[in-house]
Amino acid sequence: EPDREFAFVVEAPGMGGVNTWRYRIAPHPDGCEVTESFELSSTLLLKVYWALFGRLRITTNRDGMTATLGRMKAVVEQN
């Protein structure tokens, strides 16, 4: 949706796009709400990787997403 979502694809050498990170912006009584998400490409290698290491990645991704959203909030609130 224009002006409400942006996304980018992360590529890996020899694999092309491996995942898509997405940010959705929705109106909220206090301003706006930003939701960060990602979608893995549906390849056998990524399915195996996620099955083996997914629990570790979930924590890493959640921590990274929390930090990114916090930095975005800080920048927006400065203006």
Image: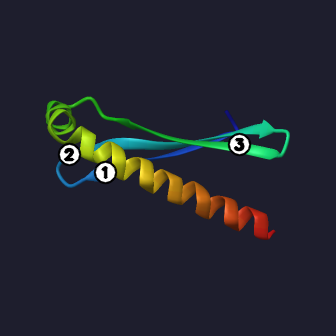
Question: What is the quadrant of residue 44 in the picture?
Answer: top left
Mark 3 Cα-neighbour bin, 10 Å: few <14, some 14–19, many ≥20: few
Determine which of the numbered discs, if any, sits on residue 15 in the image.
2
Indicate whether 79 appears above or below 37: below
Q: Nearer the viewer, residue 58 or 3?
A: 58
Q: Are marks 2 and 1 in contact (CB under 8 Å)?
A: yes
For image coordinates 35% across by 47% down, the residue present is 59
- CA gap, disc 2 and disc 1: 7 Å
Where does label 3 land, which residue? Answer: 33
Q: How is the image coloured?
A: rainbow
- In the image, 79: left or right of 22? right
Where does label 1 land, which residue? Answer: 11
Q: Residue 22 placed where, x, y %?
A: 52, 42
Q: Secondary structure at mark 2?
A: loop
Return the disc, 1 or 3, that comes first in the chain's sequence.
Answer: 1
Q: Residue 37 placed where, x, y %?
A: 49, 39
For image coordinates 77% across by 64% down, the residue present is 77
Give the tally of numbered discs.
3
Mark 1 Cα-neighbour bin, 10 Å: few <14, some 14–19, many ≥20: few
